Amino acid sequence: MNGSGKTPKRDYLDEVRKLWYKFSLNKMSVVGLGIVALVLIVSVFQPLVAPYPTHIGAVVDFKNANRGPCADYWLGTDTVGRDIMSRIFYAYRGAFTMGLGVLAATVPLGSVLGMMAGYWKGRWFSTFIMRMTDIFLALPPMILALCVCSILRPTLFNSLLAMCVAWWPWYTRLAFGMTTSLRNEMYVKSAELLGASKPHILFREILPNCTGSILTKATLDMGWVILTGATLSFVGLGEQPPLPALGTMVSDGAKYLPAQWWLSIFPALAIMIIVLGFNLMGDGVKDMLSGEE
């Protein structure tokens, strides 16, 4: 029990309630959280919630091919009779894998490099890190990812790797700017005078004050990573058939527009829904982690 009479667990619960209150003030962010949660549930439990879970692979049912939305197939079927809804549910799994994988690799790497370059600004390795960052930032992420993917064999893992190559500089630049402004704060100088180690200063003093901005950007970037991954699969550089990918489904269905519009419209709407959900949720995360009451 601390001096205020509250246990650490109670303090933790109070802090969670405070954060949720600040998040819930933005009603659209709550809607975004609901969208993301729903999409995550259907992607994880796809075999249980999909009406035709076996249709994700090399299944052929020419009897039901090219059927529009109906009672049996809510979003219609493709050219070989596979259920569009079931394939979208499975494709969401690949989209989440892409987004989480890219951010799990690039956020820690970019943030640590940026903090090191910012704290030791003026040293040769700081200059080297930031000049390499500038080189990568000079190239549009999509162009850079396409270049890397064109060299490698088209798979989900290789497209994820290509996205990592294109995404880390943004977090390096963000962490560098924040660390440069924080390294002269009194609490950092006090830690230095007390003999704290450099890792302690970076990860215990500076990083907690950068976490809010980094998490906000990561939440907003999740939608952009999924959209970029869908673009890679649209041009054939993502997950390969017969497994479904949202971009591949849009690309294949575009050949049959406008007659069989459901082949591309529904996968495109699926991309829009998940990107919109993360963007709305990102606004709430920004409000939640801001210092304003």
Image (cartoon, grey):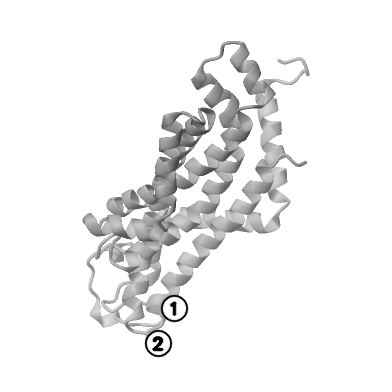
User: Residue 254 location, x and y as percent?
Assistant: 36, 79
State the image coordinates of residue 87 (x, y, percent, origin top left): 35, 65
Mark 1 to mark 2 CA distance (whole Å): 22 Å
The answer to whether residue 272 is above or below residue 222 is: below
Residue most toward the top?
Answer: 194
Instruction: Characterize the local packing of mark 1: few (<14), some (14-19) or many (20 or more) Cα atoms within 10 angstroms.
Output: few
Question: Which residue is denoted by mark 1 in the rendering?
Answer: 71
Horizontal side, residue 263 vs residue 285: left or right? left
- The amino acid type of the residue labelled 2 equals Pro
- x, y percent for residue 204: 56, 24
Q: On screen, 45 above or below 120?
A: below
Q: Residue 176: tell me if it is visible.
A: yes
Looking at the picture, how far across and down is residue 236, in whole percent? Answer: 28, 66
Mark 2: secondary structure:
loop
Image quadrant in which you'd find residue 146: bottom left
Element class at badge 1: loop
Q: Looking at the image, which residue is at 40% across and 69% down?
A: 85
Residue nearer the viewer, 253 or 1: 253
Residue at x-position 53% and y-position 25%: 202
Q: Earlier in the sequence, mark 1 or mark 2?
A: 1
Q: Identify the residue at horizontal 43%, vertical 44% (top origin).
A: 133
Left or right: 156, with 18 as reference point: left
Which quadrant is home to the N terminus?
A: top right
Count of marks placed on residues: 2
Q: Quadrant of residue 29?
A: bottom right
Between 22 and 53, the residue placed more toward the observer is: 22
Point out the frontmost of discs 1 and 2: 2
The amino acid sitting under disc 1 is Ala
Q: Which mark is residue 258?
A: 2
Residue in the picture at 56% in, 59% down:
277
Residue 45 visible in rendering: no
Circle 2 packing at 10 Å, graded few (<14), some (14-19), many (20+), is few
